[in-house]
Amino acid sequence: MKDNSNISQELLETIERYYNDTMSKQERLDFELRLDESPEFRTQVEDIKTLILGIENQSLKEQLDVFHKDIPTTHSETPMASGVFTFRKLAAAVVILLAVTGFWWFSTPQNDKLYSKYFTPDPGLPTTMSSHSNYDFYEAMVNYKQGDYQTAIAKWDAIQPKNDTLNYFLGVAYLADKNETKAIGFLNEATQNTDFPLLNDAYYYLGLAYLKDGNIDFAKKNLQKSSNENSKKLLEKLN
Amino acid sequence: MGEAYKINHQLQLITAIKDNNSIALKEFYTSNYPKVEALILKNSGSQEHAKDVYQEAFISMWNNVRNELFTPQNDSALQGYLYQIAKNKWMDVLRSKRFKTTQSLTEERTLFLKQDDTIEEDTYDEKLNITMTAFKDLGQPCKDLLKTFYFEKKSLREIALHLNIEETSVRNKKYRCMEKLRAIVLASKS
């Protein structure tokens, strides 16, 4: 690092934008051109990048020590004692696990069981930091992927006009948020267009939503329209 | 759909790691530790060794993920990757111990040992280490601010709200802290 090369606040923030991938296309092009042309600029950018990386690495390192305190210590000093101890713990865990699953198995109705077995939320669409169009949609997608369905729903709901993809993800998000009535509404909308690329999945989730709602006939009807592997398996179980 | 979902889960995990999502990082850190600890304890290491080696491996994994040096091939790829890095690092430690007691290595053996080195050494390791030490010793207010902004990726506005000050003063403070850090790095280099 050269100490005579002063780095202004503006330059720092420009490099941050480059590093975070939040530049506009034009700004990025200009920036990269400058990188190509000026070795001094390149060094400045490298220096700042190393600083940021250093901050992040050291922060992580300190964070890991905090995490580490939460790892239960499994090995005590004497191996004999630890063996007995873990065996007991294991035995206790098995008993509790059996009790809990047994209780769950006998206390939930068959359809709910099938629903829980087959329902995993759609993994969502890939989000990249630089997508400018549909910003609101992808911002909500990030919430969705983090499991924060209510925020995702609120953001998606605000977008107008609705399209197939939007209706589909609203439906799946509502379903994941345990609101099958709303889910059915949106998923029904999503299945209106026969060219919708996620049609199979939409029918699958619609079937699941009806199943959760206790409407087996409609569940079967919609599952039949989906060529999904899981739809077929679930149908077999229902028949 | 099952396979796709699993791979997608890996991609989500990778996104979360890139975002330094602390819940995901913690979950990933704590759930993968026992396996590495077992390996090191079984191979003449202590719990202290296990912790050090695992943390080093975790940081390497994190850096490689962020530099796109790693792409998942199956549903437990990143877990396996972390384990492999830790294993290699532990083998390095064992080897260096052996180096002290063994006098000569045949050419063949050196070659054999070299083959295990799959993990690349970071080229700007030294530069990075200096910066890390500088940051470690930076004053607490600056340290907190820079950590929140660069590591936790909070926006200036969020930090301003939290500290109950103007956004512009957060912005200026951040710049001054960076200058301070840079000065320490420059001083420790010469």
Image (spheres, helix red, strand yellow):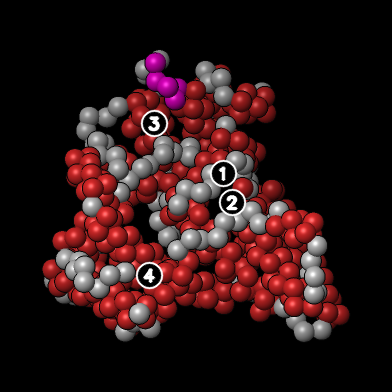
Q: Is residue B46 left or right of residue A80?
A: left
Image coords of residue B173 (percent x, y): 19, 74
Going 41% across and 39% down the picture, which residue do you hit? A126
Q: Mark 4 and 3 residues: CB-CB less than 8 Å, in contact?
A: no
- Disc 4 to disc 3, C-alpha distance: 41 Å
Look at the image and tell me in which quarter the C terminus of chain B lies.
bottom left
Whether residue B79 is in magenta: the answer is: no
Decide: few, some or many residues near mark 3? Use Cα within 10 Å; few <14, some 14-19, many ≥20: many
Name the residue tied to disc 1.
B72
Whether residue A196 is in magenta: the answer is: yes
As shown in the figure, which amino acid type bears the numbered disc 3?
Tyr
Secondary structure at numbered mark 4? helix
For disc 3, the chain is: A
Stretch of the chain drawn in magenta: A195-199
- Disc 1 to disc 3, C-alpha distance: 27 Å
Q: Is residue A231 left or right of residue A188?
A: right
- Disc 2 to disc 4, C-alpha distance: 24 Å
Name the residue tied to disc 2.
B78
- Disc 2 to disc 1, C-alpha distance: 6 Å
Look at the image and tell me in which quarter the N terminus of chain B lies.
top right
Q: Are marks 4 and 3 on the same chain?
A: yes
Secondary structure at numbered mark 3? helix
Magenta-colored segment: predominant secondary structure: loop
Secondary structure at numbered mark 1? loop
Name the disc covering residue A209, or none. none
